[in-house]
Image (cartoon, helix red, strand yellow):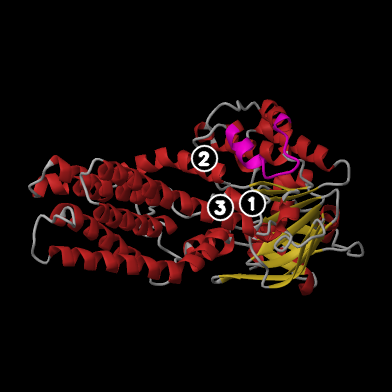
């Protein structure tokens, strides 16, 4: 199953990126996030590395979410696969989408820690933020996944999922921006005001949202995605009409 | 092969109502009806993609929803939707999805692709619509299915391939162990192929009968309008009158006699479909 999901991801990555590059807002968001620190803050190469070590995996999680959302390869509904196998596909693809950015972040932070550029506590905060973030983004893109017309495919998702997803996305980004651009290393913060406290508050809120989303939406989303009928109905009345 | 008993399925505002039909082994069932009549919904019920709200669906003796692996491994399908990976080659697609079918044979797939004039090394996305359907058809045949479910396949085929398609379908059912459900608007195809014909209209099954029985059940009678008005009203399905006379589509049986001045002809499937739709 891992091989198959990996194959699907590789297949969808290239056309997905092409599609993504046409959507100015997404493109702009990623560029903005990457250029945020060097453009608006005084920075050193050390801070820049620290910032990118967290932000690049987060952007990767968003890209995966956009180009390879939780939707099951449609042929899998038609092939002789049981519901349990489709469930496995959903879980494995979620695992891959969450694992790659998290592992990348772990690697970056490990290197920075090994070079004594950041403290262990900071590295832990960054890695946890990226894990929360990619676990939520990887569940199902929903609000991130867009069709050819650039319309977000949010129809049929359990109520409230989109709002919670967007809140979690923003909290994750704010946490990382605050951590990377404002606070720097938690053991030697750039500013000694209340910035560390604000950052920690954002971090905990982000973690709580991620936990809430998993408890409330993971199972309904999975049930939704592995059943052709639910998925088709979710796409709305237009699809219902064409299904006749 | 297929048995539907009083099947009902609601999808939004649309409802498939009280569908009962049977297809024995070794036969071809033609499914006709206008857009939105419920043909695709019915096929999706047979594929186990939808669950019936009421009634019983049996495909190859099993419930396609609860025994989906068993049923789906014996079904070959051709759909109008583009569901395969456009960026992959034909062989890549077939191998990727063929591994789920216990009987999938790359050699059979290659053989059919060769027969259909398809290069298996080309990316699927580069093919024309008709070629994509040929690919689906080759894939459907490559895993030795017992039942073929074909949703509007032949509309995009060129005349040469259409003849080949008919030949393959006829070969497929020739051993008496296989079956085909062919949903189409092209009733001329069914005139040539179908053993049974089912017509759906607004989610209701208007009829499901043997092709010959269907041909014996209706007549088109034309002549002077006042003579047509004398026909028993309960047998007239539809009537139209024009400048030069009138035509009536009527229910027929072997005891029926007609005024010798009326012209009586056996309707084609297209005419049967047209007049049923007109009746509405």
Question: Which residue lies under the disc numbered 3?
Answer: A89
Taking A29 as reference, is B237 left or right? right
Question: Which residue lies under the disc numbered 2?
Answer: A7
Q: Is residue A184 visible?
A: yes
**Disc 1: host chain:** A
> Considering only order in the chain, which callout, 1 or 2, is on the residue closer to the N terminus?
2
**Disc 3: host chain:** A
- Element under disc 1: helix
Taking B130 as reference, is A160 left or right? left
Q: Residue at x 73, y 40 (%)?
A: B143
Disc 2 + disc 3, Cβ < 8 Å = no
**Disc 2: host chain:** A
Image: magenta residue range? B92-107
Question: Distance between the Cα atoms at labels 3 and 1?
Answer: 14 Å
> Considering only order in the chain, which callout, 1 or 3, is on the residue closer to the N terminus?
1
Question: Which residue lies under the disc numbered 1?
Answer: A78
Queried whether the magenta region covers residue B249, the answer comes back as no
């Amino acid at each position: 199953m891992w091989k198959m999901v990996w194959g699907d991801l590789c297949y969808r990555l290239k056309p997905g990126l092409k599609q993504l590059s046409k959507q100015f807002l997404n493109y702009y968001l990623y560029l903005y996030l990457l250029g945020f620190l060097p453009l608006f803050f005084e920075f050193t190469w050390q801070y820049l590395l620290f910032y990118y070590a967290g932000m690049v995996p987060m952007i990767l999680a968003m890209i995966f979410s956009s180009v390879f959302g939780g939707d099951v390869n449609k042929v899998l509904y038609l092939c002789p696969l049981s519901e349990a196998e489709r469930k496995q596909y959903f879980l494995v693809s979620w695992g891959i989408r969450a694992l790659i950015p998290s592992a990348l972040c772990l690697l970056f932070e490990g290197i920075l820690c090994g070079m004594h550029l950041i403290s262990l506590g900071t590295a832990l905060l960054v890695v946890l933020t990226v894990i929360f973030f990619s676990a939520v983004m990887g569940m199902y893109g929903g609000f991130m996944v867009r069709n050819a017309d650039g319309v977000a495919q949010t129809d049929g998702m359990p109520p409230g999922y989109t709002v919670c997803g967007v809140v979690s996305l923003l909290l994750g980004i704010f946490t990382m921006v605050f951590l990377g651009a404002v606070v720097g290393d938690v053991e030697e913060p750039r500013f000694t005001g209340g910035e560390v406290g604000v950052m920690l508050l954002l971090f905990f809120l982000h973690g709580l949202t991620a936990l809430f989303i998993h408890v409330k939406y993971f199972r309904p989303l999975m049930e939704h995605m592995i059943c052709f009928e639910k998925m088709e109905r979710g796409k709305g009345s237009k699809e219902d009409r064409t299904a006749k | 092969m297929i048995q539907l008993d009083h099947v009902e399925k609601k999808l939004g505002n649309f409802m498939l109502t009280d569908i009962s039909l049977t297809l024995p082994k070794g036969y071809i069932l033609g499914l006709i009806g206008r857009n939105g009549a419920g043909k695709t919904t019915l096929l999706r019920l047979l594929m186990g993609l939808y669950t019936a709200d009421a009634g019983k669906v049996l495909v190859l003796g099993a419930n396609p929803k609860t025994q989906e692996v068993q049923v789906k491994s014996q079904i070959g399908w051709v759909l109008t939707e583009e569901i395969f990976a456009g960026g992959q080659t034909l062989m890549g697609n077939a191998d990727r999805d063929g591994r789920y079918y216990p009987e999938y044979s790359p050699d059979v797939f290659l053989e059919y692709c060769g027969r259909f004039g398809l290069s298996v090394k080309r990316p699927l996305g580069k093919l024309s619509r008709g070629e994509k359907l040929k690919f689906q058809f080759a894939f459907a045949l490559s895993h030795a299915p017992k039942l073929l479910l074909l949703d509007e396949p032949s509309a995009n085929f060129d005349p040469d391939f259409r003849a080949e398609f008919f030949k393959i379908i006829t070969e497929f059912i020739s051993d008496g162990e296989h079956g085909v459900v062919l949903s189409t608007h092209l009733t001329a195809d069914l005139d040539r192929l179908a053993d049974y014909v089912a017509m759906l209209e607004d989610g209701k099954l208007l009829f499901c009968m043997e092709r010959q029985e269907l041909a014996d059940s209706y007549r088109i009678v034309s002549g002077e309008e006042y003579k047509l008005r004398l026909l028993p009203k309960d047998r007239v399905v539809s009537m139209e009158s024009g400048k030069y006379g009138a035509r009536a589509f009527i229910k027929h049986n072997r005891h029926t006699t007609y005024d010798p001045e009326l012209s009586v002809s056996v309707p084609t499937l297209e005419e049967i479909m047209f007049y049923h739709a007109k009746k509405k």
